[in-house]
Image (cartoon, helix red, strand yellow):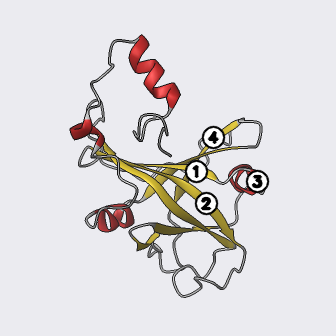
């Protein structure tokens, strides 16, 4: 995911936007060092501790979809892990039963590019992970971690970087009221 002409992790569109909008050169070698092609060691605990993340995918025409992935709970109310970091280049998360539209999974079948956004509102921190996804259709592959998952998504990390905490409100999660969108 590097621009081959400039050896930067930024693509030509990002470079052109920086040129047009007066930020050319802002992302110097020091700043670009925070965009990694792997998960730094401390990130595993941070990512696995989050209660949810946002997922972005696009189909083969570039039509986008953004959705939410949250934890599933067992019968006793104990949450299953959100995801597992397998190594510095790989993470996996479960796919549970849902509305059966398969927006994200359908996109991944024709375009493996994926973006994950993690926001910790309590501590005002966020992280991005971009990569290539593959569906693991064997529902038993991670049965010991997610016994009710229908399948899993394995992400090979291509970019991992923190975002600044500017404009992240400090929020304390609360339990939402059931059915408020159903009315």
Instruction: First in sequence, mark 4 or 2: give its number.
Output: 2
Residue sitting nearer the eye, 75 or 158: 158
Residue sitting nearer the eye, 76 or 90: 90
User: Which marked residue is nearer to the observer: mark 4 or mark 1?
Assistant: 1
The CA distance from mark 4 to mark 2 is 31 Å
Instruction: First in sequence, mark 4 or 1: give its number.
Output: 1
Give the residue drawn at x 61%, y 48%: 179
**Left or right: residue 117 compared with residue 24:** right
Vertical order, 28 against 66 (above or below)? above
Q: Residue 44 — which label?
A: none
Contact flag, marks 4 and 2 (Cβ < 8 Å): no
Secondary structure beneath disc 3?
A: helix
Q: Position of residue 164 (x, y in %)?
A: 27, 37
User: Which marked residue is nearer to the observer: mark 2 or mark 3?
Assistant: 2
Vertical order, 57 against 78 (above or below)? above
The CA distance from mark 2 to mark 1 is 6 Å
User: Which marked residue is nearer to the observer: mark 4 or mark 3?
Assistant: 3
The CA distance from mark 2 to mark 3 is 12 Å
Secondary structure beneath disc 2?
A: strand
Q: Which residue is mark 2?
A: 133
Contact flag, marks 3 and 1 (Cβ < 8 Å): no
User: Which marked residue is nearer to the observer: mark 4 or mark 2?
Assistant: 2
Give the residue drawn at x 76%, y 53%: 106
Instruction: First in sequence, mark 4 or 3: give its number.
Output: 3
Residue sitting nearer the eye, 9 or 165: 9
Instruction: First in sequence, mark 2 or 3: give its number.
Output: 3
Secondary structure beneath disc 4?
A: loop
Give the residue drawn at x 42%, y 41%: 9
Q: Which residue is mark 1?
A: 114
Q: Position of residue 129 (x, y in %)?
A: 44, 52
Instruction: First in sequence, mark 2 or 1: give its number.
Output: 1
């Amino acid at each position: 995911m590097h621009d081959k002409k400039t050896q930067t992790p930024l693509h030509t569109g990002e470079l052109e936007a920086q040129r047009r909008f007066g930020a050319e050169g802002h992302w110097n070698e020091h700043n670009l060092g925070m965009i990694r092609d792997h998960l730094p060691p401390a990130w595993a605990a941070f990512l696995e501790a989050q209660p949810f993340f946002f997922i972005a995918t696009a189909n083969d025409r570039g039509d986008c979809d953004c959705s939410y992935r949250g934890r599933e709970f067992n019968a006793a109310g104990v949450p299953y892990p959100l995801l597992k970091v397998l190594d510095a280049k790989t993470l996996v998360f479960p796919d549970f039963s849902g509305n059966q539209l398969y927006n994200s999974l359908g996109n991944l079948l024709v375009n493996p590019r994926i973006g994950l956004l993690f926001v910790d509102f309590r501590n005002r921190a966020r992280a991005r992970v971009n990569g290539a996804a593959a569906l693991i259709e064997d529902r038993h592959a991670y049965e010991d971690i997610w016994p009710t998952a229908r399948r899993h998504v394995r992400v090979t990390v291509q970019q991992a970087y923190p975002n600044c905490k500017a404009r992240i409100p400090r929020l304390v999660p609360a339990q939402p009221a059931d059915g408020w969108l159903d009315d």
